[in-house]
Each structure stands twice: as structure tokens, then as C-alpha cells.
Amino acid sequence: MKTEIRIASVIIWDGKAYIPSNARYDNDGPFTDIKPVYEVNLTMADLLPVVETILSKKPAILPEPTKNEVKERRDLMPRTTGARSWKQLGQRGISYIIELTDKGFLVEMSRLDKKGRWEFDPDKRKIFPPSTDLSIVIQTILDDLKTR
């Protein structure tokens, strides 16, 4: 039996967290950001309920997108945050991914690659057992923010 994966993306931009809903193109396909995108303050009280909501839902399954839908979804986060482009969002923002499976939580934290794009830093990857309270996972993100 395949492990079900739930993902919450947390993008930090201009002192706020942006947390998009997500979907997949089929049960095994890649995740994509969709509306609604939640904009919250960088506090436990604001982040925790939104991340809980995102992780509690199975991702929607979408039909194969049209060219317009691909562009709209690709541009969703820069447009929502007010960044001019993904490049600007990458250079001035931070990306975190929280992945939840029956094996526990995985938190990925971004850094910039040589071209100024986000990549996940393997040295900052954090793994938590399934019994971990989500507030501990969120606190890991808040603690990382303080170091940047």
C-alpha cells in the first residue's frame, strides 16, 4: 500500500507567511499550488491553524491543465505575494515545505542555488516522528527564520 503524502508550503515574503492550498494532477502526480492562499502573521497562533487545515485535507485531484491554467498556477505565488517574479520571490523570500506521511513530518528549508533560485538545503532538513505535535514543527520554521 502506498504512503499518502500531505504537503503544506509556507512561503515567507515581506514579513508575512503565504500558505497555498495544494492539489495534484493525479494520485501520483506532482503537487501544485492552488487558491485559496492564506496570508498570515509569522506567529505560532496564526501559522498553526492554517497549516493544520492544509495538512488535514487530501489534495484535490485536478485534470491535466490547459496552457492558461499552467501559467496561472505557475504565477500564483508571485502574484499573491506581490513579488514581480519567481526570481525576486526567491531572492527576497524563504520557502519551507512540511511533508506529512504515516512515517512522520519532514521539514525542508530553502537556500539559493548558484542561479539565485530556491533549492532545499539538505543540511537543514528536519525529520520528526509521527507522534510529534505540529506546533513543534512550526516552531522549527520560526526558529530558522530568526537565524536569517
Image (cartoon, rainbow, N blue to C red):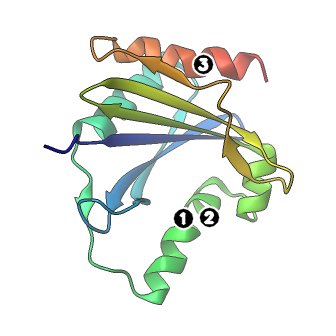
Residue 56 locus on image (x, y percent): 23, 36
Give the CA separation, mark 2 to mark 3: 24 Å
User: Mark 3 is on which residue type?
Assistant: Leu
- Check the picture and name the quadrant holding the N terminus: top left
Task: Specify the farthest residue to the bottom.
Answer: 67
Q: Report helix, strand or loop for mark 1.
A: helix
Sequence-wise, the earlier of marks 1 and 3 is 1
Residue 8 left/right relative to 71:
left
Residue underneath mark 1: 76
Number of numbered markers: 3
Q: Is residue 83 above or below residue 9?
A: below
Sequence-wise, the earlier of marks 2 and 3 is 2
Q: Is residue 37 above or below residue 95?
A: below
Q: Report helix, strand or loop for mark 2.
A: helix
Residue 45 locus on image (x, y percent): 44, 18
Q: Is residue 60 above or below residue 119?
A: below
Residue at x-position 38% and y-position 42%: 7
Residue underneath mark 3: 142
Residue 25 left/right relative to 57:
right
User: Mark 1 is on which residue type?
Assistant: Leu
Residue 146: quarter of image: top right
Give the CA separation, mark 1 to mark 3: 24 Å
Whether the residues at callouts 1 and 2 have beta carbons within 8 Å, the answer is yes
Give the CA separation, mark 1 to mark 2: 5 Å
Q: Nearer the viewer, residue 136 or 123?
A: 123
Whether the residues at callouts 2 and 3 have beta carbons within 8 Å, the answer is no
Residue underneath mark 2: 79
Residue at x-position 54% and y-position 64%: 76
Q: Which mark is residue 1?
A: none
Residue 135 locus on image (x, y percent): 41, 14
